[in-house]
Amino acid sequence: MNVVEIKNLSKKYGDFLALDNINLTVESHQIVGLVGPNGAGKTTMIKLICSMLLPTNGSIKVFGQDVTKDVTYKENIGYLGENIGYYENFTAYNYLRFFGTFYRMNGEKLKKTGIEVLKTVGLLNQSNSKISTFSRGMKQRLGLARCLLHEPDLLILDEPMSGLDPTGKKDIMEKLIDIRDSGKTIFLSSHELRYMDDVCDQICVIKNGKIIAHGTPDTILTDIKGMSNYVILLKSRDKKIDELQRVFPEIRELSVKQNILHLRVKETKDFEKKFLTYLLQNNIDFSIKTHKIDAIYSQIFEEKT
Amino acid sequence: MIKRQIKMLWNTAKETSTEHLISYHFIMCLFLCCFITAIMIWLCSYFEDTRNLKYTITSTLFPLVIIAMTYLSIMTVNIFSGEIDKQTMGTLFTLPVKRWALYFGKILGMILIIPVIVIMPVGILIFELSMIVGYLPPVLISIILQLALIIMLTFIAVISISVSVSVILRKTLYSATAMFLYLMLMVFIIPILIGGGGPVTRYNVDYALIFLLPYACFSAATVSTIILNNVDPLLYCLLMTYSLIAMVYGYFVFRRMEV
C-alpha cells in the first residue's frame, strides 16, 4: 500500500524552482530517508506533504487523500520539523495535552498516553518542567513525543536528530526502528548519513529540487556504481596495512589516522569477503563498519563536497 | 466533517482564551482597567456636576477602552504573528484542523476574553455610581449597557484589524509597530481632527463613516449617548461591518499562508 504518492510536484518560491517535477511513492512499513545537501528541497518536500506549503504544480496524496483538499489524513501523521517552535511557558505534559485535544484525546486516555510517550522519549522526570528550561535535545525529544502521542501510521521527521548528543541520536534511531517494526511508516530527512544507513529501508536522493536516485541503499549503490567507504579500527599499526592498496587494486584511497583506517573502495563483487580473509590471515586485529549512504552521498554530491 | 471542524474551532478558541485568561498579563490588564475605572468615576464625580451622569459615565469609559484596546491588539498580534515568528504556527498547520477553523478559532478565543475585560470594570462603574448618587435610574443603566455593548464591538473590530495586520505583515515587530501607529492614529490624531476628541466631540456619525476606525465609532457613540440618550444603531452596524471585512480579508490571506 502506498502511504504517500507524489505526482509531478513542483514548487516555486518566486522565480526559484525549489522542487522540479517530483514523482515519488512511499510504501507502508518502511523507513524512507530523504538525503541531499542544504537547499536541495528536502524540507520543502516535507512541508508540502504536511500542507504547510502549497504546491505550484502537481499533487500529493497521503493515505489516498489529496493534501490540498482534505485534512483528515493529518489525524494519521506525526510531523517533527527541524526548527519548529515550542510553547515555552507550557510544561512538557501540558504541551502534549494541548496537542492531544486536537486528536480527539481527552481525560484518562490522554493522561495515560502522555505519560507513556514521555517515558518513551526519556522525559518522564521532566513532565512538569517548563519547556523554557529544556535544552535543544530535550525539545527535540518532546517534539518526537508529540508525534507519537496519537499513534500515527506515518511519521514525517525533518532532521529529528539535530541537536542531540550521540547517545540521544542512537536512542532516537533505535526508537525509530521499533516504531517501524510496530507497523508504522517513517519518512525522514537527515544529514546523519551513518544513522540513516542503519535504519533506512529506502533512500531518496534529492539534488537541486530533483530526485536523482530512489531505492534501497544497495540498489542505488549498484546503480551509480559507487564507492564504498570503510572505517576499520585497528588494534595496532601493522606494516601489512601499507601493502593493502597493492594487494587490492579496488582501494582507491587509504589513510590511517590514530589507528583508524579509512578506505575508499570501488565496489566489486567479492571485495569484502577477500578483504576480510586477508586481514584474518595476516592476524590484523580489527573491527569494521561500512557506510553505504555515505558512499552514495559523496558519489552524487562529489562536486559539492 | 463540518461538525468535527466546528469542534476543532471551539477547541482552538477554548485553548486560546484559557491561555490568556490565566496569564499574568491578562490579570494585570484587568486590574488596571478596574482600577482606572474606579479612580476615574471618583474623579469625575468630584470635579463635575453629578447631575450630568451621562457625561461622567462616558468620560470614565475612555481610559478603559484605550487600555483594553492596546492589550487586545498586542495579544492578537502575538497569537498570529507571534506564532509565525516562534515557528509554532507550522506545527498547528499539521494538525487535523482546517485553516478556517484554526483562524476563526483563534479570533473567537480572543473575543471570548472581551466580556471579562468589559463586565468587571462596568460592574465597578455601576456599583460606584449607585454609591455616589444613591439611586440609578433605569435610563442610566440602559445607557451603560449600550455603551458596554459598543465597547465590546469596538474591541472585536480592533481584534479583527489586528488579525489582518498580523497575517499580512507576519513579523511580530512589524505587526506590533503597525498596530501601535494605528492605535495612535485612532486615539490621538483622529479625535483631534474630529475636534477635541472623547466625549467633548460634537456628535456627527459622518466622522465614524469617514474615519474607518473603531475608536471613531466608540467616540461618536458616547456623544450620541449624551445627545440622543442612546447609541445610534448605525454605529453598531458600522463596527460589525469593519469587523467582518477585516476578518474575511485576513482569512483569505491566512488560507494561503505558507510557513
Image (cartoon, coloured by chain):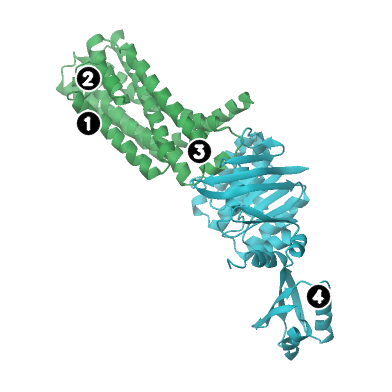
Chain colours: A cyan, B green
- Label 3 crowding class (10 Å Cα cut-off): few <14, some 14-19, many 20+? some
C-beta proximity under 8 Å, tags 2 and 1: no
Closer to us: A22 or B138: A22
Q: Is residue A280 left or right of residue B106?
A: right
Secondary-structure class at tag 3: loop
Q: Which image quadrant for residue B95?
A: top right
C-beta proximity under 8 Å, tags 3 and 1: no
Q: Which residue is mark 3?
A: B257
Secondary-structure class at tag 4: helix
In the rendered view of the protein, which quadrant contains the N terminus of chain A?
A: top right
Question: What residue is shown at x 69% (from left), y 35% (from top)?
Answer: A65
Mark linked to residue B56: 2
C-beta proximity under 8 Å, tags 2 and 4: no
Q: Which residue is mark 1?
A: B189
**Which residue type carries mark 1?**
Ile
| First-in-chain label (3 vs 2) | 2
Closer to us: A283 or A39: A39
Indicate the position of residue B180 as horizontal and vertical percent values.
Answer: 31, 37
Question: What residue is shown at x 57% (from left), y 45% (from top)?
Answer: A11
Mark linked to residue A271: 4
**Mark 3 — on which chain does it sit?**
B
* Mark 3 on the same chain as mark 2: yes
